[in-house]
Image (tube, rainbow, N blue to C red):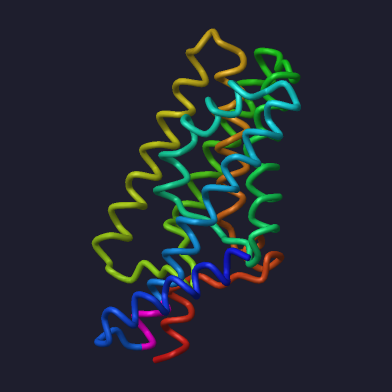
């Protein structure tokens, strides 16, 4: 349904602007799918969060993890349904874990150390993890996002160490761990994704 709406809008735009070629039309269509697809997805995610009793917590997870997700990137699922399911599992799952798991002090510090080390390695190897639809090819942009990923992850782990709010600590630790996994080659392989720079290199 969303695909048809976006295709209709793209064709309308091309009728008004005949200078738009097929390549630009593809970019416009992809942008429209992201914008229009986000609206029902957002309502569904927060609706499920409300039913699970973690509505406010899911909003908090979304806001806290937004910077790290924006800088480090990650794979995209290929269908709207898959994207809705995956995103719901990510945000609501982290909210539920953060609400229900209590880490002992020594366990917490070990986990924080592991998440920081794993995340730093993942960032070094893969961040920013782009996609073939939205490749990040400029070296300066890639370097900036990678540095911001390092910085954001480190801040998250420092806050997790010193905060007395168990739920905030859990959101930072579990969220950073799952997000770091989502940029790895393994995650891209099992979701049938390719990094944008890989596709660009293959085309050379």
- Highlighted range, magenta: 22-26
In front of the other: 6 or 67: 6
Above or below for 96 versus 125 = above
Using residue 109 as the reference point, say whether residue 130 is left or right of it: left
Residue at figure coordinates x 47%, y 45% from the top left: 69
Above or below for 123 versus 129 = above
Query: Quadrant of residue 135 in the image?
Result: bottom left
Residue 85 lies, in percent from the top left, at: 71, 50
Residue at figure coordinates x 60%, y 28% from the top left: 58
The quadrant the N terminus occupies is bottom right
The quadrant the C terminus occupies is bottom left
Query: Quadrant of residue 192 in the image?
Result: bottom right
Q: Is residue 156 magenta?
A: no
Query: Quadrant of residue 82 in the image?
Result: bottom right
Residue 163 lies, in percent from the top left, at: 50, 12
Q: Is residue 25 magenta?
A: yes
What residue occupies the far top of the structure in this picture? Answer: 164
Above or below for 15 versus 149 = below
Using residue 85 as the reference point, say whether residue 177 is left or right of it: left
């Amino acid at each position: 349904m969303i695909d048809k709406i976006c295709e209709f809008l793209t064709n309308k735009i091309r009728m008004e602007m005949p200078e738009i070629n097929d390549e630009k039309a593809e970019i416009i269509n992809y942008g429209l799918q992201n914008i229009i697809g986000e609206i029902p997805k957002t309502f569904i995610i927060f609706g499920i969060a409300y039913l699970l009793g973690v509505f406010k917590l899911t909003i908090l997870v979304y806001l806290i993890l937004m910077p790290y997700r924006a800088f480090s990137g990650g794979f995209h699922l290929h269908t709207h349904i898959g994207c809705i399911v995956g995103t719901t599992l990510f945000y609501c799952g982290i909210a539920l874990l953060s609400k229900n798991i209590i880490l002992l002090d020594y366990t917490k510090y070990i986990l924080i150390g592991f998440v920081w080390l794993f995340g730093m390695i993942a960032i070094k190897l893969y961040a920013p993890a782009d996609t073939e639809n939205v490749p990040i090819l400029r070296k300066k942009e890639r370097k900036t996002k990678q540095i911001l990923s390092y910085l954001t992850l480190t801040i998250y782990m420092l806050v997790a160490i010193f905060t007395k709010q168990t739920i905030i600590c859990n959101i930072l630790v579990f969220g950073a761990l799952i997000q770091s996994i989502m940029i790895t080659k393994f995650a891209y392989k099992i979701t049938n994704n390719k990094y944008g720079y890989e596709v660009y290199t293959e085309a050379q």
